[in-house]
Amino acid sequence: MNRHLVISLPLPVCKSYAVFGALRYEAARLAGKLTVEMTTGCMIPMMSVGDIGMIRQGPAPLGEGDIVALKRCQSCIVHRFLGRRGGGGFYHQGDMVIVPEVSHPEDAVVGRLVVIRRGSRLLHLDHPFIKVLSRLFVRITRLEAGFLEMFDLEKTRLAKLLMVWHRFWSTTLWSLCWFSLSRPERDRYTV
Protein backbone atom coordinates (compact mmCIF):
# COMPACT_ATOMS: atom_id res chain seq x y z
CA MET A 1 0.00 0.00 0.00
CA ASN A 2 1.51 3.30 -1.09
CA ARG A 3 0.82 6.39 0.96
CA HIS A 4 1.33 9.85 -0.46
CA LEU A 5 1.64 13.09 1.43
CA VAL A 6 0.96 16.34 -0.37
CA ILE A 7 2.29 19.43 1.37
CA SER A 8 1.38 22.89 0.20
CA LEU A 9 3.06 25.75 2.03
CA PRO A 10 3.91 29.33 1.14
CA LEU A 11 7.46 29.66 -0.17
CA PRO A 12 8.90 31.67 2.79
CA VAL A 13 7.86 28.91 5.20
CA CYS A 14 9.54 26.21 3.07
CA LYS A 15 12.84 28.12 3.15
CA SER A 16 13.11 27.52 6.88
CA TYR A 17 15.52 24.61 7.35
CA ALA A 18 13.83 23.39 10.54
CA VAL A 19 10.38 23.31 8.94
CA PHE A 20 11.69 21.68 5.76
CA GLY A 21 13.61 19.06 7.75
CA ALA A 22 10.55 18.28 9.88
CA LEU A 23 8.35 17.97 6.78
CA ARG A 24 10.88 15.73 5.03
CA TYR A 25 11.09 13.54 8.12
CA GLU A 26 7.30 13.32 8.42
CA ALA A 27 6.87 12.48 4.71
CA ALA A 28 9.49 9.71 4.93
CA ARG A 29 7.95 8.40 8.15
CA LEU A 30 4.51 8.18 6.54
CA ALA A 31 5.97 6.44 3.49
CA GLY A 32 7.69 3.93 5.80
CA LYS A 33 11.16 4.36 4.28
CA LEU A 34 13.44 6.27 6.58
CA THR A 35 17.14 6.57 5.88
CA VAL A 36 19.86 8.50 7.63
CA GLU A 37 23.21 9.60 6.22
CA MET A 38 26.19 9.69 8.54
CA THR A 39 27.78 13.13 8.70
CA THR A 40 30.10 12.59 11.68
CA GLY A 41 32.66 9.98 12.63
CA CYS A 42 31.11 8.93 15.96
CA MET A 43 30.25 5.42 14.69
CA ILE A 44 33.46 4.72 12.75
CA PRO A 45 34.26 2.05 11.59
CA MET A 46 30.80 0.43 11.68
CA MET A 47 29.40 3.50 9.90
CA SER A 48 31.64 5.94 8.09
CA VAL A 49 30.83 9.46 6.95
CA GLY A 50 28.58 9.16 3.90
CA ASP A 51 27.16 5.71 4.76
CA ILE A 52 23.39 5.38 4.54
CA GLY A 53 21.48 3.63 7.33
CA MET A 54 18.06 2.18 6.57
CA ILE A 55 15.77 2.43 9.56
CA ARG A 56 13.02 0.05 10.61
CA GLN A 57 10.38 1.92 12.53
CA GLY A 58 7.98 0.41 14.95
CA PRO A 59 7.56 -0.83 18.46
CA ALA A 60 10.12 -3.63 18.20
CA PRO A 61 12.11 -3.90 21.43
CA LEU A 62 15.68 -2.67 21.33
CA GLY A 63 18.40 -5.16 22.11
CA GLU A 64 21.78 -4.52 23.64
CA GLY A 65 24.15 -3.46 20.86
CA ASP A 66 21.48 -2.40 18.35
CA ILE A 67 22.25 0.75 16.37
CA VAL A 68 19.43 3.24 16.80
CA ALA A 69 18.45 6.56 15.28
CA LEU A 70 17.39 9.15 17.85
CA LYS A 71 15.59 12.37 17.04
CA ARG A 72 17.09 15.19 19.09
CA CYS A 73 15.70 18.69 18.51
CA GLN A 74 15.90 19.21 14.74
CA SER A 75 18.55 16.58 14.06
CA CYS A 76 18.96 12.84 14.12
CA ILE A 77 21.80 11.06 15.90
CA VAL A 78 22.91 7.48 15.34
CA HIS A 79 24.35 5.63 18.32
CA ARG A 80 24.60 2.15 19.75
CA PHE A 81 21.93 1.18 22.32
CA LEU A 82 23.58 0.00 25.56
CA GLY A 83 20.64 -0.69 27.84
CA ARG A 84 17.83 0.81 29.88
CA ARG A 85 18.26 3.12 32.85
CA GLY A 86 16.51 2.56 36.16
CA GLY A 87 14.62 5.87 36.25
CA GLY A 88 13.53 5.76 32.62
CA GLY A 89 15.51 6.51 29.53
CA PHE A 90 18.48 4.53 28.30
CA TYR A 91 22.22 4.60 27.70
CA HIS A 92 23.67 5.05 24.22
CA GLN A 93 27.04 5.93 22.73
CA GLY A 94 28.99 6.24 19.53
CA ASP A 95 31.47 3.46 18.80
CA MET A 96 34.48 5.80 18.96
CA VAL A 97 33.97 6.71 22.63
CA ILE A 98 34.11 4.67 25.81
CA VAL A 99 31.90 6.70 28.14
CA PRO A 100 28.14 6.32 27.42
CA GLU A 101 25.57 9.10 27.15
CA VAL A 102 22.26 9.08 28.97
CA SER A 103 19.20 9.74 26.87
CA HIS A 104 17.53 13.07 27.46
CA PRO A 105 13.76 13.51 27.77
CA GLU A 106 13.55 15.11 24.32
CA ASP A 107 15.26 12.15 22.70
CA ALA A 108 12.91 9.94 20.77
CA VAL A 109 13.81 6.65 19.18
CA VAL A 110 13.06 6.98 15.50
CA GLY A 111 13.89 3.34 14.83
CA ARG A 112 16.54 0.68 14.65
CA LEU A 113 19.01 0.52 11.79
CA VAL A 114 18.68 -2.76 9.92
CA VAL A 115 20.86 -2.19 6.87
CA ILE A 116 23.91 -0.01 6.26
CA ARG A 117 24.81 0.91 2.69
CA ARG A 118 28.41 1.85 1.97
CA GLY A 119 28.96 2.55 -1.70
CA SER A 120 27.52 -0.46 -3.53
CA ARG A 121 27.68 -2.85 -0.53
CA LEU A 122 25.01 -3.65 2.05
CA LEU A 123 25.56 -4.89 5.58
CA HIS A 124 22.48 -6.46 7.19
CA LEU A 125 22.54 -5.79 10.94
CA ASP A 126 20.05 -8.58 11.70
CA HIS A 127 22.67 -11.20 10.78
CA PRO A 128 23.13 -13.47 13.86
CA PHE A 129 26.92 -13.05 13.83
CA ILE A 130 26.64 -9.25 13.86
CA LYS A 131 24.08 -9.42 16.71
CA VAL A 132 26.51 -11.48 18.82
CA LEU A 133 29.46 -9.20 18.00
CA SER A 134 27.37 -6.11 18.85
CA ARG A 135 26.53 -7.51 22.30
CA LEU A 136 30.18 -8.44 22.85
CA PHE A 137 31.23 -4.95 21.77
CA VAL A 138 28.91 -3.37 24.36
CA ARG A 139 30.19 -5.58 27.17
CA ILE A 140 33.86 -4.95 26.42
CA THR A 141 33.17 -1.21 26.19
CA ARG A 142 31.45 -1.37 29.60
CA LEU A 143 34.59 -2.98 31.06
CA GLU A 144 36.72 -0.21 29.59
CA ALA A 145 34.38 2.46 31.00
CA GLY A 146 34.56 0.70 34.38
CA PHE A 147 38.36 0.88 34.33
CA LEU A 148 38.22 4.59 33.56
CA GLU A 149 35.79 5.20 36.40
CA MET A 150 37.36 2.87 38.96
CA PHE A 151 40.87 4.24 38.60
CA ASP A 152 39.81 7.82 37.75
CA LEU A 153 41.83 7.56 34.58
CA GLU A 154 40.13 10.18 32.44
CA LYS A 155 43.10 12.57 32.41
CA THR A 156 46.04 10.20 32.48
CA ARG A 157 48.30 8.62 29.91
CA LEU A 158 46.72 5.27 30.72
CA ALA A 159 43.35 6.64 29.57
CA LYS A 160 44.90 7.62 26.26
CA LEU A 161 46.36 4.14 25.88
CA LEU A 162 42.98 2.61 26.67
CA MET A 163 41.36 4.78 24.00
CA VAL A 164 43.98 3.73 21.44
CA TRP A 165 43.36 0.10 22.39
CA HIS A 166 39.56 0.62 22.06
CA ARG A 167 39.91 2.15 18.60
CA PHE A 168 42.28 -0.59 17.46
CA TRP A 169 40.14 -3.57 18.45
CA SER A 170 36.82 -1.97 17.41
CA THR A 171 38.23 -0.98 14.01
CA THR A 172 39.54 -4.50 13.50
CA LEU A 173 36.25 -6.10 14.56
CA TRP A 174 33.91 -4.01 12.41
CA SER A 175 36.27 -3.93 9.42
CA LEU A 176 36.29 -7.74 9.43
CA CYS A 177 32.46 -7.68 9.54
CA TRP A 178 32.33 -5.40 6.51
CA PHE A 179 34.90 -7.50 4.68
CA SER A 180 33.28 -10.87 5.37
CA LEU A 181 29.53 -10.20 5.76
CA SER A 182 28.61 -7.32 3.45
CA ARG A 183 27.00 -8.17 0.13
CA PRO A 184 26.68 -6.37 -3.21
CA GLU A 185 23.67 -4.11 -3.41
CA ARG A 186 20.72 -5.53 -5.34
CA ASP A 187 17.65 -3.70 -4.11
CA ARG A 188 18.57 -0.45 -2.39
CA TYR A 189 15.48 -0.13 -0.27
CA THR A 190 14.84 -3.69 0.84
CA VAL A 191 14.67 -3.61 4.60
Image (spheres, rainbow, N blue to C red):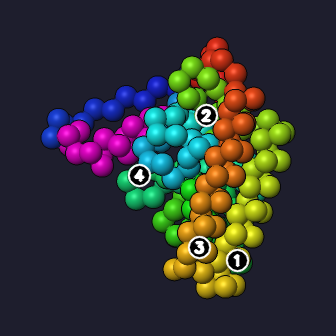
Q: Which mark is residue 116?
A: 2
- Mark 4 vs 2, N-terminal side: 4
Q: Outermost residue, left direction?
A: 12
State how far apart marks 1 and 2 are (Cα): 32 Å
- Mark 3 vs 1, N-terminal side: 1
Q: Secondary structure at mark 3?
A: helix
Which one is in front in this view, the residue at disc 1 or the one at disc 2? 1
The part of the chain drawn in magenta is 13-29
59 or 103, nearer to the observer = 103
Q: Amino acid at mark 4?
A: Ser
Q: Position of residue 100 (x, y in %)?
A: 60, 68
Which one is in front in this view, the residue at disc 4 or the one at disc 1? 1
Q: Which mark is residue 147?
A: 1
Q: Secondary structure at mark 4?
A: strand
Q: Amino acid at mark 1?
A: Phe
Q: Position of residue 98 (x, y in %)?
A: 61, 66
Q: Quadrant of residue 93?
A: bottom right
Query: Which quadrant of the figure contains the N terminus?
Result: top right
Q: Amino acid at mark 3?
A: Ala
Mark 3 highlights which residue? Answer: 159
146 or 26, nearer to the observer = 146
Q: Secondary structure at mark 1?
A: helix
